Image: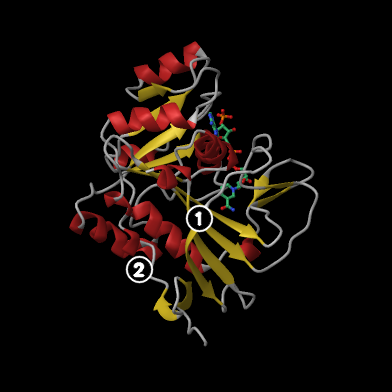
């Protein structure tokens, strides 16, 4: 079976079927999956066959997703996940990257161009024009991007009870809503998700890195993981994987496969698998 450009093969659930990439994750209707008082929390990563989500520059220690792992298909699917969020949870590291011009600002649905149709999709499907944005930080050393105010997006800063009091006060004076969710200076997944649920959010997209993913998984609030595996081995001694914390016990944490798609063409030939896995919060409900 071959998949043309922009198409891929659904391998699981059987029987295999050729489908368009566009619309595949939108069909999940994540904004309608929450339980009472329990938002639906989902995350996504792109990784290599040897489990790297980023390689670190030995000189600076800065990590980056190598361009050879990425494709137009996985970016489109990421934008479809973001389009279904009533709240995107991200972090101060991304704010610093935006401010320094190291990464593009993708905090608005419908921008950049490959997702232009998604802004209309949100409105047609009962979501607000743009998602609220949670920025997690222990240091509180970041600037809120001006694009959020320009687009009327609600901004919530999440931090721990031990966060620097002067910076917390400064953020409050600027009019930003603050959630203190965590006993130390870091944000803990369980308290954050409960606080956002109380504010009425239903679909929370973790557009974040290993630390937030780790705490959401450990606290049992992760409902679903969307994992893109690019069929390349990277090696390297300094790298990141999806998790930041200590071992998860002898048995680890089990995620249940609910769908598997394969695109043999991207990026540049080696192919990618798009795996949808149900997390502890989905299994518990
Ligand atoms: N391949 C992929 O799909 C993928 C996805 C995401 C990230 N990555 C890569 O993975 C590497 C590391 O990820 P990252 O830098 O995005 O994220 P990270 O290392 O998990 O966190 C970066 C910053 O976010 C804030 N933060 C994160 N979790 C927090 C928590 N629980 N409480 C308080 N603050 C928290 C901290 O900011 P403060 O210092 O202000 O406290 C932290 O320094 C990067 O190289 C990135 O490019 C790859």
Does residue 250 appear left or right of residue 186 in this picture? right
Q: Which residue sits at x=38%, y=52%?
A: 82
- Say which residue label 2 marks: 23
Q: Position of residue 151 (x, y in %)?
A: 29, 43
Q: Which residue sits at x=66%, y=60%?
A: 48
Question: Depth-wise, is mark 2 or mark 1 nearer the camera?
Answer: 1
Figure quadrant, ligand 1: top right
Q: Position of residue 128 (x, y in %)?
A: 23, 46
Q: Nearer the viewer, residue 100 or 73?
A: 73
Residue 266 numbered tag: none
Q: Position of residue 260 (x, y in %)?
A: 50, 67
* Element class at badge 2: loop
Coloring basis for residues: secondary structure
Q: Nearer the viewer, residue 281 or 39?
A: 281
Quarter of the image with the C terminus is top left
Residue 64, compared with residue 193, is above or below; it is: below
Say whether disc 2 or disc 1 marks the residue closer to the N-terminus. Answer: 2
Residue 256 numbered tag: 1
Q: Which residue sits at x=29%, y=38%?
A: 201
Labelled pair 2, 1 in contact (Cβ < 8 Å): no
Q: Position of residue 161 (x, y in %)?
A: 48, 16
Q: Which residue sits at x=62%, y=42%?
A: 243
Bin the neighbour count of mark 2 within 10 Å (Cα to Cα): few under 14, some 14-19, many 20 and up.
few
The answer to whether residue 50 is visible is yes
Does residue 88 appear left or right of residue 239 in this picture? left
For ligand 1, tell me if the residue under mark 2 lies within 8 Å: no
């Amino acid at each position: 079976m071959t998949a043309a450009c922009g198409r891929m093969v659904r391998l699981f659930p059987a029987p295999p079927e050729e489908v368009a990439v566009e619309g595949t994750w939108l069909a999940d209707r994540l904004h309608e999956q929450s339980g009472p008082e329990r938002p639906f929390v989902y995350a996504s990563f792109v990784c290599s066959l040897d489990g790297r989500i980023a390689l670190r520059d030995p000189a600076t220690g800065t990590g980056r997703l190598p361009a050879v792992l990425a494709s137009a298909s996985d970016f489109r699917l990421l934008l479809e996940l973001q389009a279904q969020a009533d709240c995107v949870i991200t972090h101060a590291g991304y704010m610093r990257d935006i401010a320094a011009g190291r990464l593009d600002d993708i905090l608005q649905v419908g921008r950049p161009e490959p997702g232009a149709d998604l802004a209309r999709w949100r409105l047609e499907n009962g979501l607000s024009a743009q998602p609220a944005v949670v920025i997690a930080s222990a240091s509180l050393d970041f600037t809120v991007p001006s694009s959020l105010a320009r687009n009327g997006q609600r901004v919530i800063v999440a931090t721990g009870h031990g966060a620097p009091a002067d910076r917390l006060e400064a953020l409050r004076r600027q009019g930003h809503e603050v959630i203190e969710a965590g006993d130390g200076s870091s944000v803990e997944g369980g308290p954050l998700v409960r606080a956002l649920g109380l504010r009425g959010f239903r679909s929370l997209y973790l557009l974040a890195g290993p630390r937030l993913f780790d705490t959401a998984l450990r606290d049992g609030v992760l409902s679903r993981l969307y994992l893109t595996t690019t069929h390349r081995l990277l090696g390297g001694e300094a790298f990141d994987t999806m998790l930041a914390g200590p071992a998860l016990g002898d048995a680890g944490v089990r995620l249940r496969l609910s769908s598997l798609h394969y695109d043999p063409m991207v990026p540049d030939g080696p192919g990618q698998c798009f795996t949808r896995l149900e997390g502890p919060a989905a299994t518990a409900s």
